[in-house]
Image (tube, grey):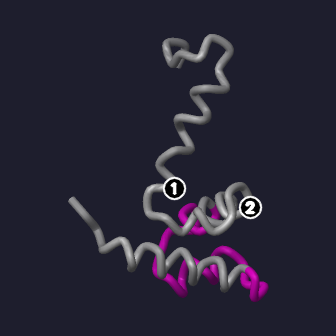
Amino acid sequence: MRRGSTSSVRYRRAMMLLASVGGNRVPVIAKVVQADEDTGRDTIHRFDEIGLACLDPNSLVAAPARLLGALPDCSSTGL
């Protein structure tokens, strides 16, 4: 089930980044864009990692795969 169009996701993420650059804290940003605080933190951290590519609606999905690749045997059997 889709929660919104990709342009609305991109817009909300851009608003989070602009609010962060403006000096606002995560709780304030979350209220402004009506999102969870963790979503705001994830977006800001992802921007620090990959830049404006974080605005892509699919950019946050790839993060767990990178974590699995960091496991010593590159498998998730130990989870």
Whether 46 is drawn above or below 75: the answer is below
**Which residue is tagged 2?**
48
Q: Considering depth in this image, is 65 or 31 the residue closer to the camera?
A: 65
- Please state the horizontal and vertical placement of residue 57, each as a whole percent of the image: 44, 63
- Please state the horizontal and vertical placement of residue 9, each as a whole percent of the image: 42, 73
N-terminal of the two: label 1 or label 2?
Answer: 2
Q: Secondary structure at mark 2?
A: helix
Q: Which residues are magenta?
A: 21-41
Residue located at (65% from left, 77% from top):
17
Amino acid under disc 1:
Ser
In the image, taking residue 48 as reference, residue 37 lies left or right, namely left
Image quadrant for the N terminus? bottom left
Labels 1 & 2 near each other (Cβ < 8 A): no
In the image, taking residue 24 as reference, residue 9 lies left or right, namely left
**Which residue is tagged 1?**
59
Amino acid under disc 2:
Asp
Residue located at (47% from left, 49% from top):
61
Whether 31 is drawn above or below 63: the answer is below
Residue located at (53% from left, 16% from top):
75
Q: Secondary structure at mark 1?
A: loop
- Please state the horizontal and vertical placement of residue 28, each as a whole percent of the image: 63, 83
Q: Is residue 25 in the magenta section?
A: yes
In the image, taking residue 8 as reference, residue 4 lies left or right, namely left
To which quarter of the image does residue 71 belong? top right
Q: Residue furthest front?
A: 53
Magenta highlight: main SS? helix
To which quarter of the image does residue 25 belong? bottom right
Q: Considering depth in this image, is 27 or 63 the residue closer to the camera?
A: 63
Inter-mark Cα distance, 1 to 2: 13 Å
